[in-house]
Image: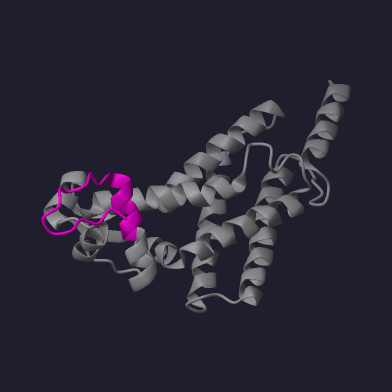
Amino acid sequence: MARISAGSTPLQVTRDDIVDAAVRVIDRDGPRPSMDDIAREAGITKPRLYRQFADKGDLFTEIADRMTRRAFSATGSDMTLMLAPPRAALRRVFTDYANGILEHPNVFRFLGQSPAQQSGSGVLQLDLGREAAGKLTKMARSVAEAVPLETSGLEYLSRALVGAVVAITDLWLSDSDRPTPEQTAEFIDQATELVWGLIDGFLRRQGIAADPDTPIFATFAAVNQARSADS
């Protein structure tokens, strides 16, 4: 932590340092941080904080971006859902996702329960879901085009997936200050089956019946083979 003492030369405090400080404040004090508390935690004055961030909205957007990257990293590479049976792969994804959230539950509460933050330039919408859905669509499109698979509707599927996960994450975190292992296990089970149901529905609309306990690449290979035989 980049703290300064009286009479010392101020240390260089970066945007990342300030985000680190904000995350610590939210972890410790809950999902309603003040800019004074964040500046104090970073060891700087509030005017110095505002030289790094235009306003409160700018800082909160940076927090949202970091947490989006952290949550999205749980999905792994483009091949995560291809090389393992979907149900097993999704369970692994949501186990990693849940473990990541449990490191900073108040930060995710802050992002989920405080969708709008007042700033000097007005009210800024922190759309965690839109960013994650955009990344998910890009990843899904690259997989679909390699199969090949009809990509129409992928944006809707991605928004539905992210929206469902954000909603049930809020439900899971609202049960207690710190979810129990049993609550977390239930969340992982429910998230796995809900997300698979949405993916399965999307595939079935294209005439593809996928087994959640069979690697998805094997299903696509069989579909491609059948299509080649018909052509």
| Residue 126 in sight | no
Task: State which region is magenta.
Answer: 1-22
Figure quadrant of residue 146: top right
Q: Is residue 68 left or right of residue 146?
A: left
Which residue reaches farthest bottom? Answer: 176
Q: Which residue is more in the foreground, 102 or 93?
A: 102
Q: Is residue 147 left or right of residue 116?
A: right
Asked if residue 205 is positioned above or below residue 42 in the image, the reply reads above
Which residue reaches farthest front? Answer: 7
Quadrant for the C terminus, please.
top right
Asked if residue 225 is positioned above or below residue 123 in the image, the reply reads above
Asked if residue 59 is positioned above or below residue 24 in the image, the reply reads above
Percent coordinates x, y for residue 178 in the rendering? 51, 75
Percent coordinates x, y for residue 89 in the rendering? 72, 50
Percent coordinates x, y for residue 78 in the rendering? 64, 36
Most common secondary structure along the magenta stretch: loop
Residue found at x 59% / y 33%: 141
Residue found at x 36% / y 52%: 63
Percent coordinates x, y for residue 188 in the rendering? 65, 64
Asked if residue 75 is positioned above or below residue 45 in the image, the reply reads above
Colour approach in the figure:
one colour
Quadrant for the N terminus, please.
bottom left
Residue found at x 60% / y 47%: 75
Q: Is residue 200 left or right of residue 154?
A: right
Q: Is residue 203 left or right of residue 25?
A: right
Q: Which residue is more in the foreground, 118 or 19?
A: 19
Residue found at x 66% / y 76%: 182
| Residue 158 in sight | yes
